[in-house]
Amino acid sequence: MEGLEKFARTLRALSAESKAALQAETTRAAAEMVTLARALVPVKSGRLRDSIVASSGPPPAHAQFAGGGRSEIATHVTSGNTGARHSALVEHGTKPHTVDGKFKGARHPGSEPHPYFFPAYRAQKRAFSRRMNKAMRAVARRHAEGG
């Protein structure tokens, strides 16, 4: 039983150290993605550029998720806020459409997409995965060596 208890303690320590290492890498990768996305985004007033941020903890209320679930180890990179609600329109462009409101009935020719968010993500994705694996191997190696 003593060996089993020692093994359980080692696994708990490995888990805690792994989470810390992965969170550090996630935070670093998110900061790099923010820097790249801010460099790629077209700038008029700067509000959209300034809205690109990374945050840890619970996701912002306006965040949308694709694919998998949420994780304890997460840093969210978001674009757009109450002062810059046009992030998706800039990223994906718009089709020609009829305008409502003050200029009701006017034809808007649409706008060209200016991708900045997903290109920044795609540029970082492989390096991020490699760094996460490297961090996990380093933690496992330290524990295997008795550290």
Image: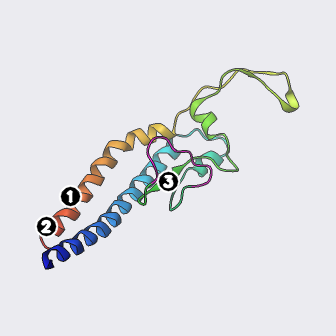
Residue occupied by mark 3: 76
**Closer to us: 11 or 142:** 11
> In the image, is 9 to the left or to the right of 78?
left
Q: Are marks 2 and 3 in contact (CB under 8 Å)?
A: no
Mark closer to the chain start, 2 or 3: 3
The amino acid type, in three-letter code, at marker 2 is: Ala
Q: What element carries label 3?
A: strand
Three-letter amino acid code at the position of disc 3: His
Q: Is residue 63 magenta?
A: yes
The residue at 82%/29% (across/down) is 100
Q: Nearer the viewer, residue 142 or 112?
A: 142
**Residue shown at 13%/67% (left/top)?**
144
Asked which secondary structure carries label 2, the reply is helix
Magenta stretch: helix, strand or loop mostly? loop
Who comes first in sequence, dot 1 or dot 2? 1
Q: Where residue 93 sits in the image (x, y, percent)?
A: 61, 29
Q: Is residue 125 magenta?
A: no
Magenta-tinted stretch? 60-70
Please state if 3 lies on the left or on the right of 84 as rendered: left
Ranked by sequence position, the earlier of labels 1 and 3 is 3
Label 1: which secondary element: helix
Cα distance between the residues tagged 2 and 3: 32 Å
Crowd band around label 3 with a 10 angstrom C-alpha radius: few (<14), some (14–19), many (20+): some
Which amino acid does the dot numbered 1 rest on? Arg
Residue carrying label 2: 144
Q: Name the residue under label 1.
A: 137
Q: How far apart are marks 1 and 2 (CA)?
A: 10 Å
Quarter of image, res 124: top left
